[in-house]
Image (cartoon, rainbow, N blue to C red):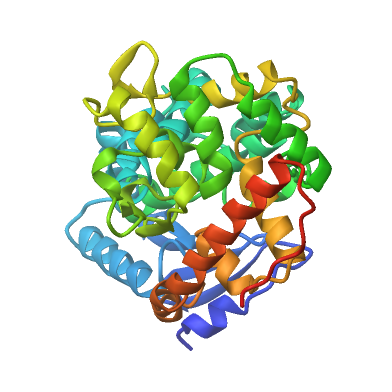
Amino acid sequence: MPLTDVQIRNLNPGPKTYKKYDGRGLFIEVRTSGNKIFRFKYFFNGKHQLLTLGHYPEISLKRARDQHQQARIQIAQGINPAQEKKSAKEHKTKTFKETATEWYNNTKSKWTTDHANTVWRRLEVNIFPWLGDRPIDQVTTKEILEVLRKVENRGAQEVARRLCQTISQIFIFAVASGITDGNPAGDLHKALKPRKKRNLPAITDPERIRTLLQAIEGFEGSFIVYCALRFAPLVFVRPGELRKAEWAEIDWNGALWTIPAHRMKKKREHLVPLSRQALTILNDLHPLTKESRYIFPTVRSLSRPMSENTLSAALQRLGFSKEEHCPHGFRTMASTRLHEMGWNSKTIETQLAHIDQNKIRGIYNRAKYLEERTRMMQAWADYLDALKQEARVLPFVAG
């Protein structure tokens, strides 16, 4: 009897490779590794021939049947489909880098510019020197693993896992585009070292927060960097969102900073209520950088945003090592303290731009919590002021 998609999905690997036939020479081969491969066995010029159609589920049952029927037509016309496929691939096979470039250009619009640059740079440094010029249909699981092991061996386990995901996505794209038949990186993550839990360093103890805030007040470097250091704890956005903040995004009358979707990690517009303290910082800085597109441009040029290492270097200059606190740590600082002080978790998470998995509910929350978020941001700024001034700070909650 012909196979069904449900039957194929439920085929489990056994101690030996086995076959399940669909009819007229078309069958699926189930290997001990769990890989499932559509093949077509036929006679041509009196000899047995075998044509590989592709791996399931990248190649669906319907697509396998269509290819099977096309191969039968070729045989009837005196054409050997296996030889025809081999000849076609010799002329059309693309390298791994060529295919990766197509995938990247097709996908990068879904990402922020920083993330897109990171993805491509990782491939350039870690993958292309070894696999870039290889025909993509000849790249094996073993070869990919060997390259990823090089990354792991230098201690970059998280980078290795992310590269594995990227390579798998490139092969999925290649299969869907008809460039190759299978994904040799599909299950490769199982062979990599376990992910280490990594918490970004952050100061959350009130006494240590006070020390940090007082140190920032005494910063003697660039005025632009000084303002960015003071502004960061008040808005607790991601470092990239802070560095690339633009004057055009500030609603002075509404005391609101609107970060456009293309600069957000999750590609959704984000609203940041600005406290009186945050507005004061912007007012102080405006005369200096108003001719720039960016609120916090680099010291050397008004046409470019502050570099990604500037705030980290400034914190280290103040005596706070990268193991104790980093620019991203201002988010953890605010989240930890606000939760401990009794603010509504949904309000905090919304302000952190941690997107609700339910998209409809997420859109609703964006409007629902804005008033409460505005009160929370002002209360947070007042709390930091009182802490910095060494006043006795009482817990505050949304009232």
Picture coordinates of residue 248, whole percent (x, y): 23, 43
Is residue 137 among the parts visible in the rendering? no
Report the number of discs.
0
Question: Does residue 12 appear left or right of residue 165 in this picture?
Answer: right
> Is 7 displayed left or right of 102 in the figure?
right
Which is more toward the observer, 76 or 198? 198
Between 293 and 230, the residue placed more toward the observer is 230
What percent of the width, then of the height, locates residue 348? 59, 65
Towards the viewer: 63 or 390: 390
Q: Is residue 348 visible?
A: yes
Q: Residue furthest bottom?
A: 1
Task: Say if 129 sits above or below 337 in the image.
Answer: above
Q: Is residue 93 above or below residue 255?
A: above
Q: Where 389 falls versus 254 (above or below)?
A: above
* Most foreground residue, 219 or 168: 219
Percent coordinates x, y for residue 82 in the rendering: 35, 49
Quick check: 241 above or below 134? Answer: below
The quadrant holding residue 147 is top right
In the image as oriented, which residue stretches furthest toward the top? 300
Q: Residue at left 40%, top 31%?
A: 117
Q: Residue at x 62, y 79 (%)?
A: 10
Q: Residue furthest left?
A: 77
Position of residue 66 in the picture relative to residue 224 (left or right):
left
Residue located at (37% from left, 50% from top)? 173
The answer to which quarter of the image holds residue 94 is: top left
- In this rendering, would 365 be left or right of 212? left
